[in-house]
Image (spheres, grey):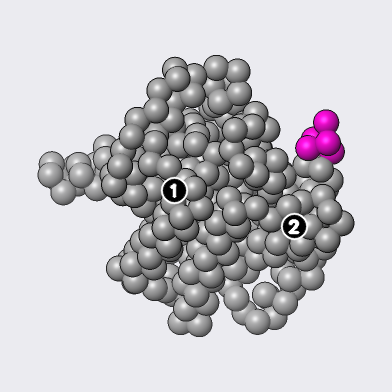
Amino acid sequence: MLILAKSILGLMIGFFLSVILGLFLIPVLRKLKCGQTISSFVAFRHASKQGTPTIGGLIFIIPTLITMILLYLRGSLEITHNLLIIIFVFVSYALLGFVDDYLKVRDHNNDGLSITQKLVVQVLIALVFFYIYMQGGGDAYLTITSLGINIDMKWLYGLFILFLLVGSSNAVNLTDGLDGLAGGLSLIAFLSFGIITWGTTWIAGYQEIAIFCFILVGSILGFLVFNTHPAKVFMGDTGSLALGATLAAVAIVTKHELSLALIGGVFVMEVLSSIIQLTAIKKFKRKVFLMAPIHHHFEKLGWEETDIVKMFLIVGFMLGMVAIYYGVWM
């Protein structure tokens, strides 16, 4: 029960700090003219969002780190090796996203860092994570706990980790196109992983990882106070890259890599819809969807933004429940 109490405490502190920071930071971002430039591709429904403050990921990133420090100082949280490398990924991808957001705001466009520049940095961070993870006692086994299967992937596990970190960070980034969508799905995902991690007693520092997940849930919840429709702030790449990569890091460290595909099922769907669309256009000169990623397809069909977000969150919640059943009881 102690881990539950610590998790709830972390969630509450993260939430309140996030709300307080949001109340302070959003006016500052407006004053600094850190507004989002709306792409011409989505201007048909989102022109009114032009100039909405971005870089809002700071609203849940900073409170999460502060809450962890507070819990550490009161002796409620131990900074273990596994938790430390998750924090490394969280902060590193946040910094990458911040630089990208800053360049977009400075130049008043959606260019930012080039795709190559972002990919190179993402890969480098993933390689550092893999090295530290293995040096700290990590293994190259892909574990299917419910079936008692351990697959030794050897050096291929490094490529697998690279794929998960880079793929997950970009998947959340791609999903961040509607008010409250990426934030809501990430909240569900970290809540699911937090519950699952309670049961991974064989993982060193599992309690601290679970508490971290709940702290992040609270911080994201506070951010959603300002990000639900009509959004007063966007998380930007600062938030989306950090959330996506951290989801993958938690899955890797807790040996629930396959659960990530379930918990992040909506993110996977968004990516697949974009890949299918690009492939169809390139190979067959025709579209499969009215627009990709798929949340824009529903917009083109005439769905209200809030209805799309509700539907996707329901799907994400159900997938999270399935993943919890798979990860905890099977």
Between marks 2 and 1 in the image, the one whose residue lies nearer the viewer: 2
The amino acid sitting under disc 2 is Met
Q: Is residue 282 above or below residue 2?
A: below
Question: Measuring 30% from the left and 42% from the top, which residue is drawn there?
Answer: 154
Question: Measuring 54% from the left and 21% from the top, which residue is drawn there?
Answer: 326
Q: Mark 2: which secondary structure?
A: helix
Looking at the rendering, the stretch of residues picked out in magenta corresponds to: 1-5
Crowding at dot 2, Cα within 10 Å, few <14 / some 14-19 / many 20+, comes out as many
Residue 293 location in percent, x, y? 39, 45
The amino acid sitting under disc 1 is Ser
Mark with earlier residue (2, 1):
2
Question: Measuring 61% from the left and 42% from the top, which residue is drawn there?
Answer: 204
Residue 102 location in percent, x, y? 52, 77
Q: Mark 1: which secondary structure?
A: helix
Query: Which residue is nearer to you in this view: 120 or 311?
Result: 120
* Residue assigned mark 2: 68
